[in-house]
Image (tube, helix red, strand yellow):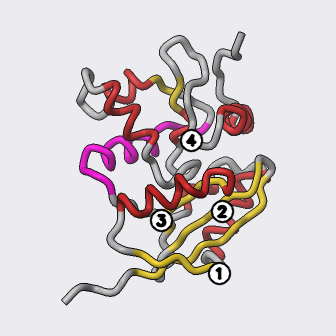
Amino acid sequence: MSKPPETLILERLPTPVGEAILVADAQGVLRAFDWTSHEARLRLLLRRQNPPTTLVEGRAPAVIREAVDAYFAGDLTALAAISWRTGGTDFQRSVWTALCAIPVGETVTYKQLAERIGRPSAVRAVGLANGANPVGVVVPCHRVIGSDGSLTGYGGGLERKRWLLTHEGASFRAAA
């Protein structure tokens, strides 16, 4: 007998860089964070990384909403209060955990991230795992930059990445 789909709550929340989508489970744990402009990507990642789920519009837990609001208002450590859980492979989860160790205001390269997880030759795989992160901003994939210090791909768009890094006081090389 198959288990019924898990019901997840989806809330849309305004931010200074566009409307965010928060997805939480019944236990109040964040399962996804993305932008409404990338909602199809969010839904794809949820399907790939979770057992069957049903999304229903509603309100995310107050602790999640308040932490997101506080972060965008300038409390750059507020997102650490959010509990999150993802599916994904063991390798992907190791990358996402390593992302959380990058302090606010700092950046690392894909190579440095690969070295941090003990897989120095897996730079490309680290990049793919970074791009499959379903809990953007909270799991700070935006803090990974190119080896030359330039901004590289970000699922939410480079303008958002630029804004987030500037908001956090991080250094990066501006595009020519």
In this rendering, the answer to whether 8 lies above or below 33 is below
Please tell me whether residue 120 belongs to the stretch shown in magenta.
no
Q: Where does the C terminus fall, quadrant-wise?
A: top right
- Residue 20 pos. (x, y %): 68, 58
Secondary structure under the numbered disc 2 in the rendered image: helix
Q: CA distance from mark 4 to mark 3?
A: 16 Å
The residue that label 1 is drawn on is: 58
First reached walking from the N terminus: tag 1 or tag 2: 1
The residue that label 2 is drawn on is: 67
In this rendering, the answer to whether 107 lies above or below 59 is above
Region rendered in magenta: 88-104
Residue sitting nearer the eye, 21 or 109: 21
Q: Badge 1: how crowded within 10 Å, few (<14), some, or many (20+)?
A: some
The residue that label 3 is drawn on is: 31
The residue that label 4 is drawn on is: 155
Secondary structure under the numbered disc 4 in the rendered image: loop
Q: Where does the N terminus fall, quadrant-wise?
A: bottom left
First reached walking from the N terminus: tag 3 or tag 2: 3
First reached walking from the N terminus: tag 4 or tag 3: 3
In this rendering, the answer to whether 57 lies above or below 105 is below
Q: Residue at x 46, y 80 (%)?
A: 27
Q: Badge 2: how crowded within 10 Å, few (<14), some, or many (20+)?
A: many
Q: CA distance from mark 3 to mark 2?
A: 15 Å
Please tell me whether residue 97 belongs to the stretch shown in magenta.
yes
Q: CA distance from mark 1 to mark 2?
A: 17 Å
First reached walking from the N terminus: tag 4 or tag 2: 2
